[in-house]
Amino acid sequence: MTQPQLPAQMQAAVLRDFGQLTLESVPVPEPGPGEVLVRVRACGLCGTDLKIVSGGFRGTWPPALPFIIGHEWSGEVAAGGPGTERSGLAPGDRVVAENHTGCGACTMCRAGRYNLCERVREPGFKLYGHTAPGALAEYAVRPAVALHKVPAHVTDVAAALVNQGALTVHAARRAMLGPGDSVAVFGPGLLGLLMLQVARAAGATTVVMVGRGKRLAVARELGSTAIVDYEETDPVAGVRAATGGRGADCVFDCSGNTSVIPQALRSVRRGGSVALLGLAGGATAELPVDLVTLDELNVLGVRSSPNAYPAMIALLASGAIRTEPLTTDLYPLADVAAAFDALKRREAIRPIITM
């Protein structure tokens, strides 16, 4: 791979103390064996980033300070490290990056479930933006095997949604969502609004969105067949009414709110599946054991997006997933604090930093 001339320093949003991100000039990282240096073009901010910055996962995400966060992003190949000559990547290629790189040797990695690498606390496993440096910077380094090319007609901003979209693809697969199914989605944030679109693309004919505020109108615009405003209607009653009283075949919790879990379990049909996509920051939830047991409910954890990036990129490229209503709030890196404030106040579905 040709090695162009690169700057020695870059701008990055650095977490030096919990609750405080500072814009700093730091060295451009150098790609090691099998790694690629990528010029970041767009990086989204999510609820997990808020929790990381506030110290909600301190000691684990990140393991130490200072730290660069950011895990929902797109970019352009800048240079390759040793051993990337046969990677199929070249400077100028537009790419998105997976977050997990497992050890490659444990049982889970060998089974293709590298998101569940058994050596998660050992060298070899990296969760970028959480335990390894993220992409809220002008440049980022990633293994070539974690990068996926993006078609020319998919914009940098749209491509920054592949990370979250691939998570919903993985969720649909875990729940065995199929044509003609009914779906309920709790939480009309970015994750939920992508989940409803992926559910429709997978063949769901009924998609009920549960939430509040103006985001419900966005859900309707993006294909939700029914909406339930939990400030006006009991969520369980609303979902059951929209599914003919039977309950949804699949329920997806995209909220990360522990109070939603019992509601989701009472909104699914007997023998149905409830998939949990949101993180609760260590909080716990009530589990109605008799209901889960007697109705033989499938309660599924969904972590990251193993083997799901190609499918999400294809959905974006085909036009099956609309991103314009989800990416209206763009900020330069210098305004990262304002972007976080907009996310915290729920003023933006997904603030995106553009470089």
Image: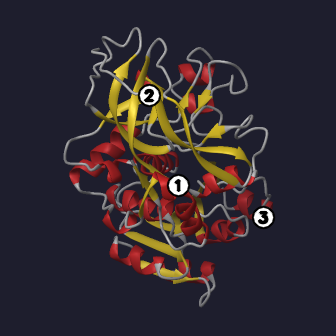
Kindly state the secondary structure of the residue where label 2 is placed.
Answer: helix
Q: Earlier in the sequence, mark 3 or mark 1?
A: 1
The residue nearer to you, when weighing 193 against 99, is 99
Residue of label 2: 146
Q: Which residue is the extreme one toward the left?
A: 153
Q: What residue type is labelled 3?
A: Pro
Q: What residue type is labelled 2?
A: Ala
Residue 186 to residue 37: above or below:
below
Quick check: can you spot residue 352?
yes
Indicate the quadrant where residue 116 lies: top right
- What colouring style does the render use? secondary structure
- Which residue: 41% across, 81% down? 217
Please state the horizontal and vertical placement of residue 212, each as a whole percent of the image: 55, 81
Q: Which of marks 2 and 1 is nearer the N terminus?
A: 1
Residue 164 to residue 135: above or below:
below
Q: What residue type is labelled 1?
A: Leu
The residue nearer to you, when weighing 86 against 204, is 86
From the viewer's perspective, is the residue at label 3 or at label 1 nearer? 1
Please state the horizontal and vertical placement of residue 101, each as a whole percent of the image: 54, 26
From the viewer's perspective, is the residue at label 3 or at label 2 nearer? 2
